[in-house]
Image (tube, grey):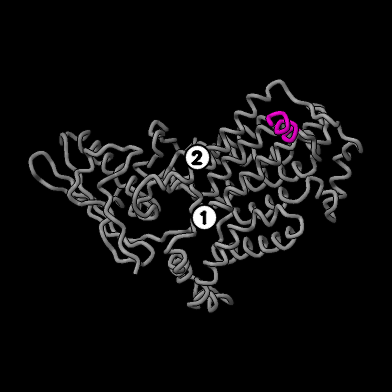
Amino acid sequence: MLARLTTALFRPIDIAWLVVARIVVGFMLAMEMAGSLALGYTREYIEPKFHFSYLFFEWMPHWSPPVIIGLHLGAIVAGIAVAAGWRYRWAAVVLALCYTLLFLAEQTRFINHFYLYCLVAAMLALMPAHRAASADVRAGRVLPATTTPAWTRYLLLFQLSVVYSYAGLAKLNADWLMARPLAVWLAPKASYPVIGGLLGSAAVPWVMSYAGVAFDLLVAPLLLWRRTRPWAFGAAMFFHISNVLVFGLGTFPWFSLLVTGALFFPPDWPRRLPYVRQWIAARVPLPAATPTPVPVIPRSVPVLLAGLGLYAAVQLLVPLRHFLYPGDVHWTEEGHHFAWHMMLRAKSGSLSYRVVLPNGDTDVVYPANYLTRRQVNKLIGQPDAILQFAHFLAEDYAKRGHGQVAVYAESQVQLNRRPSRPIVAPTINLAAEPRTLSLYKWITPAPPLQ
């Protein structure tokens, strides 16, 4: 069994698809960072007096403005270098490192596609994507190749299938099936020119909700089946371009569409596509007519197999961890990150803190005095972030000589148009509550769906 698996994973396949994937990923990730710089998103890392962290990554430093700008510029240069195949291994490592450091720098900047970009950049660093049609080949730094091991394609196929499938499974909840989240997201878009009247229709959130579930759950298997692949890719084009028109979402829809095309069609598809095939033919020779019957198996295969198996297990299990917690994950947020939950909850409300000093005096603290607007908007609906900021306030008061204070959160939060209620118990001293993976018992029950 293991021998057959190893043979399948190391079977040589046409490298043409990997060349296109390298160019698409490098260019798109460079564009994402260029857009972040141009639109001023770097302020979200620079202006706040406090940065939210991921659990177990509290040790991450608060980067200075030059470092934040440098990470963005580094990602842009590295992305272009990856696309060109110039000093590819180093460029891919730098690209993955810049993205990962920025991802970990501010938890309220969590976006599913940013997380996906970190993963894909790291994967590319392990792949021989520079062995054809690259600056490294032209400079003689690496020997050219016409094939790549099949595991390179399978790994990316697996990752994209996980994203689609888990996004679909996450939509099988009462709020989504009652079109609540999309009704909230689409309401402000009724004023759009041309399509605004359509988006403001009461029926559109329902149609988009059920179409979204069907697309996410079915697109990967339908793309894998040759007979349905053209129709499934047509649906993917419609889905992702619709997202561009309605929600924007930066580079993500284009990235998803192009990478989907690069992965789910046969490895030699670039040789058949008009315009692309001429460019590929001039730079990537055809593989030998009779490929090596027995794939070349490197000595490091046990390590690679163990790594691939561990990675697959993490990607399959981590998105399911929210089932270990009672309650509605869209309310508690316990297990929300890294689970491919996309646009499933719309939260709004208010939040302030009562800081009780040792002498009994009470201060009312508003997060907006310390945080950016985006941070405040995210903080309001995330109990773990509410806890983090309570700890920060306690430490801040201690540094200013006030001693040990108690910190209470006063909140009113609405989820997907459900009735508003406090998201955390206002009687709990959050300064004394530890930050942990365990259940936060001070989170209130989710309001009922009406």
Residue 4 lies in the magenta stretch:
yes
In this figure, which residue is indicated by the disc labeled 1? 169
- Mark 2 packing: few (<14 Cα in 10 Å), some, or many (20+)? many
Residue 152 lies in the magenta stretch:
no
Which image quadrant: the N terminus?
Answer: top right
Which image quadrant: the C terminus?
Answer: bottom left
Between circles 2 and 1, the one closer to the viewer is: 1
Give residue 331's mark.
none
Q: Secondary structure at mark 1?
A: helix
Residue closer to the observer: 157 or 366: 157
Residue 269 position in % (x across, y down): 80, 50
* Quarter of image, res 395: top left
Q: CA distance from mark 2 to mark 1?
A: 29 Å
Residue 400 relative to residue 374: left or right: left
In the image, which residues are magenta? 1-10
Mark 1: which amino acid? Leu
Residue closer to the observer: 445 or 71: 445
Give residue 102's mark.
2
For the question of whether residue 17 can be seen, the reply is yes
Q: Main secondary structure of the magenta part?
A: helix
Q: How many marks?
A: 2
Residue 246 position in % (x across, y down): 56, 66
Q: Is residue 18 above or below residue 251?
A: above
User: In the image, what residue occupies the spot 58% across and 40% down?
Assistant: 119
Q: Earlier in the sequence, mark 2 or mark 1?
A: 2
